[in-house]
Image: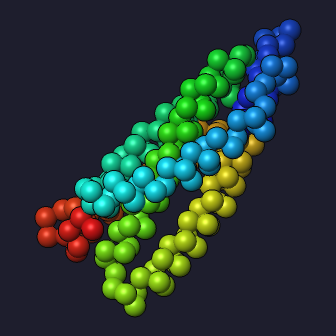
């Protein structure tokens, strides 16, 4: 995302049409791209710790709402930067929003794994944790693919808006099974 969105910029030609050209002052992806995953991994235990105090599904609900808002905001910033004659003006907000997304993902990861330990009995816990880990690994594969395809299509914001819809669905599912009156398991 950093290379494609900030590595190029829009420039007006003599006839007034806009074309994408190299951004001579583009931020380096190698300098910045590691921060989000690092923050997400570092903060994961905090998600479990907070979940121990207030309940995993409450933490998951709050984090899902944060991810919906942050995904929409990130999509908007990506669209603005992608179509800008000076995308660098959007970089710090872009980076901050991605750090928020990674931090929320890390906290949500901790709350999810904490909830699994409460919801399932000793015999079910292992297989559920394994399946959940596999789904998480697939997410780490598919999310960059979807983003890459949308960036190449010239619509990077659509990937983030799609992720926001996914997080909103997760929010509803979490509420339905763990937070509503008569829930399957109340706030594990």
Q: In this picture, is 106 found above or below 186?
A: above
Q: Residue at x 37, y 75 (%)?
A: 117
Seen from the viewer's position, the closer of residues 13 and 37 is 37
> Which residue is at the front of the view, 144 or 161?
144
Name the spot of residue 148 as percent of width and height, x first: 71, 48
The residue positioned 38% from the left and 67% from the top of the image is: 114
Say whether residue 147 is visible: yes
In screen coordinates, is 150 left or right of 55?
Answer: right
Residue 159 spot, x, y in % from top left: 59, 46
Give residue 93's position: percent from left, percent from top. Answer: 56, 26
Q: Is residue 30 left or right of residue 47?
A: right
The x, y position of residue 98, in whole percent, is 57, 39
Residue at position x 40%, y 91% in the image:
123
Q: Is residue 175 visible?
A: no
Examine the image and state in which quarter residue 155 appears. Answer: top right
State left or right for residue 175 relative to residue 127: left
State the quadrant of the N terminus: top right
Quadrant in the rendering for residue 22: top right
């Amino acid at each position: 995302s950093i290379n494609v969105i900030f590595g190029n910029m829009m420039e007006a030609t003599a006839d007034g049409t806009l074309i994408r050209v190299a951004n001579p002052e583009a931020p380096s992806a190698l300098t910045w791209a590691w921060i989000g995953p690092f923050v997400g991994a570092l903060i994961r235990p905090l998600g479990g710790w907070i979940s121990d105090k207030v309940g995993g599904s409450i933490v998951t609900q709050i984090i899902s709402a944060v991810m919906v808002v942050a995904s929409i905001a990130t999509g908007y910033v990506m669209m603005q930067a992608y179509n800008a004659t000076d995308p660098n003006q959007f970089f710090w907000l872009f980076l901050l929003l991605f750090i928020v997304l990674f931090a929320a993902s890390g906290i949500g990861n901790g709350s999810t794994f904490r909830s699994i330990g409460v919801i399932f009995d000793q015999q079910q816990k292992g297989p559920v944790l394994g399946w959940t880990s596999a789904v998480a690994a697939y997410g780490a594969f598919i999310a960059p693919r979807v983003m890459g395809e949308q960036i190449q299509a010239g619509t990077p914001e659509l990937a983030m808006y799609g992720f926001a819809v996914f997080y909103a669905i997760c929010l509803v599912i979490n509420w339905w099974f763990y937070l509503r009156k008569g829930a399957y398991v109340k706030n594990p």
